Image (spheres, grey):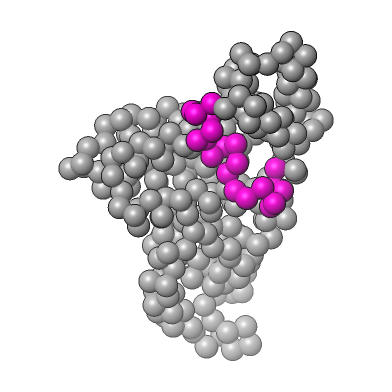
Amino acid sequence: MVGTGDATLDVTDAMHAFALSTMAQCKGLSGYILKKGSPSCGMERVKIYSNKGIPRNDGRGLFAETLLTTYPNLPVEEEGRLNDNRLRENFIQRVYVYHRWLRLCADGLSVGGLVEFHAQHKFMLLAHDEAAYRALGPIVAGARADTLEKSAESYISRLMAALKRPATRKRHTNVLMHIAGFVKKSLSTDDKRELGQLLDQYRTGLVPLIVPMTLLRHHLRKAPNAYLNRQYYLQPYPEDLMLRNFV
């Protein structure tokens, strides 16, 4: 990293030292937003110049590299990419998941706590990555007190990697239909028809996710289901953020 006006001004070592010195301050963070294209804070496609001044766009900022290496599970996104509705919703969701994980660990992680955490995020995980959904179950089931730390590290690493993959309408529809299967027993014929129509409208892109989700939550308030009510998929972050109005 050199000066733009004076190429003899090399601040690479100083930036590395600064980045390392600030990592301890980042330990309790639940998410981090980086600056697009920055030689210090760019997450990807940062310009790297050859000795002849020819750029290539495959670099990463020095601070960003240190942050991502030190905290590989930390939700990180570039500010420019947050203009995309789907990426913004995905990032905020990951921030809240990771915050819950940090809180669980701070309170004292136990085998039971890990099992409950996984149970609360099952449908959310299924909406993002079915393969990870199937792989994480055995990790949780095999967790024991004497190997809990190793199991927990493997679990959160794979969970956060899976959630980084944005959910699609197809995968959301699959999860919504799973939830609908739980609530249909308490619905009238007309209610079932209305729910089916909204699920199809969401699947085909006519309405955003909030529409079928709101109806399902309405039915769950009328006929509570203990298993579904513990699912963070139904409300992964504060409702007033309105992120599901646009995905």
* Residue at image location 35% in from the left, 57% down from the top: 106
Inspect the magenta stretch and tell me whether residue 66 lies in it. Answer: no
Q: In which quarter of the image is residue 41?
A: bottom right
* Residue at image location 57% in from the left, 37% down from the top: 233
Q: In this view, does 190 lie above or below 66?
A: above
Q: Is residue 49 among the parts visible in the rendering?
A: no
Percent position (x, y) of residue 80? 69, 60
In the picture provided, is 136 more to the left or to the right than 45? left
In this view of the protein, which residue sits in the foreground, 122 or 150? Answer: 122
What stretch of residues is rendered in magenta? 225-244
Q: Residue furthest left?
A: 146
In this view of the protein, which residue sits in the foreground, 2 or 118? Answer: 118
Percent position (x, y) of residue 163? 52, 42
Q: Residue furthest top?
A: 189
* Residue at image location 28% in from the left, 40% down from the top: 111
Q: Is residue 86 above or below residue 21?
A: above
Percent position (x, y) of residue 176? 63, 26
Q: Residue furthest front?
A: 222
* Residue at image location 33% in from the left, 34% down from the top: 140
Q: In this view, does 165 lie above or below 212?
A: below
Q: In this view, does 20 lie above or below 235?
A: below
Percent position (x, y) of residue 148? 25, 43
In this view of the protein, which residue sits in the foreground, 188 or 84? Answer: 188
Of the 4 image quadrants, the one containing the C terminus is: top right
Main secondary structure along the magenta-highlighted residues: helix
In the picture provided, is 22 more to the left or to the right than 198? left
Q: Quadrant of residue 124?
A: top right
Q: Is residue 178 among the parts visible in the rendering?
A: yes
